[in-house]
Amino acid sequence: MRVSGSDVLFKIVAIFLVVMAVLAMFGKLRFPGQKHLNSKRCPSCGRFKIGKGPCGCQKGGRGK
């Protein structure tokens, strides 16, 4: 059985589109701990806070 080049190309494109659709579905999922990560952001500038102290934008030092 001979397979033409267009059949192979069609199969490659179809598999690529299926893989991209599966990746898009996984990208839409909400991962556990995402709400916890968003609560660790500074309310004024939006950067992640590291440690328990105030954010660099509130200290006024090198944070700007």
Image (cartoon, grey):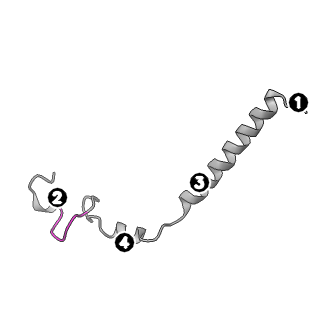
State which tag comes first along the sequence, 3 or 2: 3
Left or right: residue 7 versus residue 38 is right
The x, y position of residue 9, in whole percent, is 75, 33
**Relative to 56, is 18 on the left or the right?**
right
Residue 24's mark? 3
Q: Earlier in the sequence, mark 1 or mark 3?
A: 1
Q: Which residue is mark 1?
A: 2
Residue type, label 2 = Cys
> For the view shown, which residue lies furthest in the top direction?
5
Q: Chief secondary structure of the magenta span?
A: loop
The crowd level at tag 2 (other Cα within 10 Å; few <14, some 14-19, many 20+) is some
Cα separation between marks 2 and 1: 67 Å
Q: What separation in Å lies between label 4 and label 3 (alpha carbons)?
A: 23 Å
Question: What is the spatial separation of the Cα atoms under label 2 and label 4, in whole angstroms?
Answer: 21 Å
Instruction: Check disc 3: other Cα within 10 Å, few if <14, some if 14-19, many if 20+.
Output: few
Instruction: Tell me the magenta residue range.
Output: 49-55
Q: Secondary structure at mark 3?
A: helix
Mark 2 or 1, nearer chain start: 1
Which of the 4 quarters of the picture holds residue 7? top right
Name the spot of residue 22 as percent of width and height, x first.
Answer: 63, 54
19 within the magenta span: no
> Which residue is depicted at the point 67% across and 43% down?
16
Q: Which residue is mark 4?
A: 36
- Identify the residue position indicated by label 2 in the image: 57
* SS type, badge 4: helix
Residue 54 on the magenta span: yes
**25 or 10: nearer the viewer:** 10
Label 1: state its secondary structure.
loop
Residue 21 point in image, percent of width and height: 65, 51
**Given this view, does label 1 or label 4 mark the residue nearer the observer?**
1
Indicate the quadrant where residue 36 lies.
bottom left
